[in-house]
């Protein structure tokens, strides 16, 4: 009995959510989280986390763009000339982002106004290019698509949690609704101005990394 | 390794495909986008006269029924034959004050009173900011104000587009008792400037550059209209 012959046809009709594919989707949430482990996309994590709403929208935008650019690049990965692969990746990403931007302007004008520059910033988000280079260039389209979704969600998760902390302590509100009661302010409580500034996000993400590394065995350096 | 020839052809084909896709997307979506931009401008003008509805049809109807558009110049003359709605404020601001075409929107409220809406354009920290300020019939008291921005930081400079900041302007005065133009200053509460509380609103903590930009914008955009207001009053 040869194991090789039994596994190879199986690979062809591998179920859409096989164990391997599920792992591709869930790994970026913890073990290879783009922000806290790969340390990618930190720049935008500092910029858009003063409030929860832009953080959520940015997370969705990055997820969609990462997923579809991963998919497209994986589909044409064998035809891309190695010497200009980065440019090709960038063109695809920019194309997707521009189309999303145009569609938002035409059909969801309010959302597009809220997002304003952030949509354009997705192009420069290192997670997108990072995943294209590290994953989509060498993997099949479907796992690449899942990898894009997973990384987008892993990024979004950190973004939203950081935004919750910053909006709560910086503005005393959540999603724009005041949650810190007036009597607390009257009693001398005041919003923390530092939370509104970019360094606060850096501290919070730093603390996340610390907690994650101390709990997740896989991330503890053996040496 | 692919040949140079292949690489060149690949790059050219990719560029052409992307260009075609983008051109179609941009052209095909243009009418919808232009309609949105026009509606947004009308909504902003109505926001400055304390209207807060959001329904498209209602906004179009109210705007059509109660807003009169006109263009004036700094000498106070009414200019005819120019579409006020289509005047590009940014281009006008680049001209010397005397040559500017100044769009003015006159809103007649349900109470029969007129509010004079002045469009404004200025610079924030990251990009342009703009807004509309409406004055009562005395050309002195601010009835309402609306500000918006392209890319100010959420939670900081972007607060100028939020209601609490804009509400502060209601009831402020732009002239002093001697009919000198003072404008409304956007400064921090503790700033020691020589104007009374009716001429100042609280700026945004952490949004100093945007606040200063708003302050400058108010001064630069409202003053040229004083000529016209003077003529209407007399």
Image (cartoon, rainbow, N blue to C red):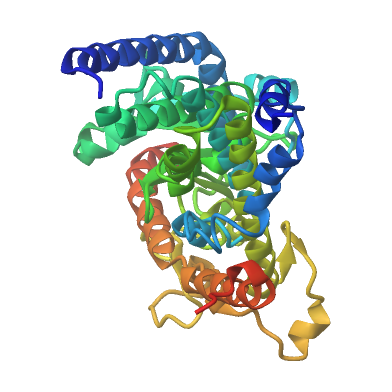
The residue lying at 18 percent from left, 12 percent from top is B5
Residue A182 percent coordinates (x, y): 80, 78
Q: Relative to the observer, which residue lies in front, B82 or A66?
A: A66
B51 vs B158, left or right, is right
Please, which residue is most extreme toward the bottom here? Answer: A188
Q: State which quadrant residue A212 falls in.
A: bottom right
Please, which residue is most extreme toward the front here? Answer: A1
Q: How many marks?
A: 0
Residue A15 percent coordinates (x, y): 77, 27
The residue lying at 70 percent from left, 32 percent from top is A3
| Up/down of B182 relative to B88, above or below | below
| Up/down of B190 relative to A155, above or below | below
Residue B128 percent coordinates (x, y): 38, 45
A79 vs B3, left or right, is right
Question: Which quadrant does the C terminus of chain B fall into?
Answer: top left
Q: Relative to the observer, which residue lies in front, B23 or B142?
A: B23
Q: Relative to the observer, which residue lies in front, A209 or B117?
A: A209
Question: Which quadrant does the N terminus of chain B fall into?
Answer: top left
Q: Is residue A11 among what the camera can see?
A: yes
Q: Is residue B75 among what the camera can see?
A: no
The residue lying at 58 percent from left, 56 percent from top is A32
| Up/down of B11 relative to A112, above or below | above
A190 vs A202, left or right, is right
Q: Relative to the observer, which residue lies in front, A104 or B173?
A: A104
Residue A181 percent coordinates (x, y): 82, 76
The residue lying at 42 percent from left, 15 percent from top is B22
């Amino acid at each position: 009995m040869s194991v090789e012959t039994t596994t190879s046809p199986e690979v062809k009709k591998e179920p859409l959510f096989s164990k391997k594919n599920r792992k591709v989707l869930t790994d970026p949430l913890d073990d290879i989280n783009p922000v806290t482990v790969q340390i990618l996309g930190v720049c935008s994590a500092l910029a858009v986390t003063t409030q929860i709403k832009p953080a959520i929208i940015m997370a969705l935008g990055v997820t969609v763009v990462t997923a579809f650019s991963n998919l497209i690049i994986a589909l044409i990965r064998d035809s891309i000339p190695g010497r200009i692969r980065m440019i090709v990746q960038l063109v695809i990403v920019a194309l997707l982002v521009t189309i999303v931007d145009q569609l938002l302007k035409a059909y969801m004008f309010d959302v597009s106004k809220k997002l304003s520059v952030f949509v354009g910033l997705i192009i420069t988000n290192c997670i997108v290019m990072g995943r294209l280079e590290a994953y989509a260039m060498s993997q099949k389209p479907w796992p690449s698509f899942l990898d894009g979704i997973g990384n987008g969600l892993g990024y979004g998760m950190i973004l939203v949690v950081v935004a919750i902390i910053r909006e709560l302590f910086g503005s005393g509100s959540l999603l724009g609704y005041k949650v810190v009661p007036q009597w607390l302010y009257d009693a001398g409580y005041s919003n923390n101005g530092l939370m509104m500034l970019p360094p606060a996000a850096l501290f919070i993400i730093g603390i996340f990394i610390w907690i994650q590394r101390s709990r997740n065995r896989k991330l503890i350096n053996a040496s | 390794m692919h040949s140079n020839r292949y690489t060149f052809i690949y790059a050219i084909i990719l560029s052409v495909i992307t260009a075609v896709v983008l051109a179609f997307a941009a052209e095909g979506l243009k009418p919808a986008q232009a309609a949105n931009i026009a509606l947004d401008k009308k909504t902003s003008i109505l926001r400055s006269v304390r209207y807060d509805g959001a329904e498209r049809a209602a906004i179009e109807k109210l705007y059509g029924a109660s807003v009169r558009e006109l263009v004036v110049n700094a000498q106070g003359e009414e200019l005819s034959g120019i579409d006020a709605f289509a005047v590009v404020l940014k281009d006008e601001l680049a001209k010397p004050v005397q040559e500017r075409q100044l769009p003015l929107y006159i809103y007649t409220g349900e109470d029969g009173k007129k509010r004079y809406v002045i469009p404004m354009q200025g610079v924030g920290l990251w990009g342009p900011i703009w807004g509309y300020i409406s004055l009562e019939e005395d050309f002195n008291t601010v009835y309402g104000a609306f500000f918006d921005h392209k890319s100010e930081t959420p939670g900081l400079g972007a607060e100028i587009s939020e209601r609490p900041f804009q509400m502060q302007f209601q009831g402020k005065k732009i002239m002093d008792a001697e009919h000198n133009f003072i404008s409304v200053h956007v400064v921090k509460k503790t700033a020691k400037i020589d104007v009374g509380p009716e001429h100042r609103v609280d700026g945004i903590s952490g949004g100093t550059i945007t606040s200063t930009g708003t302050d400058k914008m108010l001064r630069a955009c409202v003053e040229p209209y004083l000529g016209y207001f003077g003529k209407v009053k007399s």
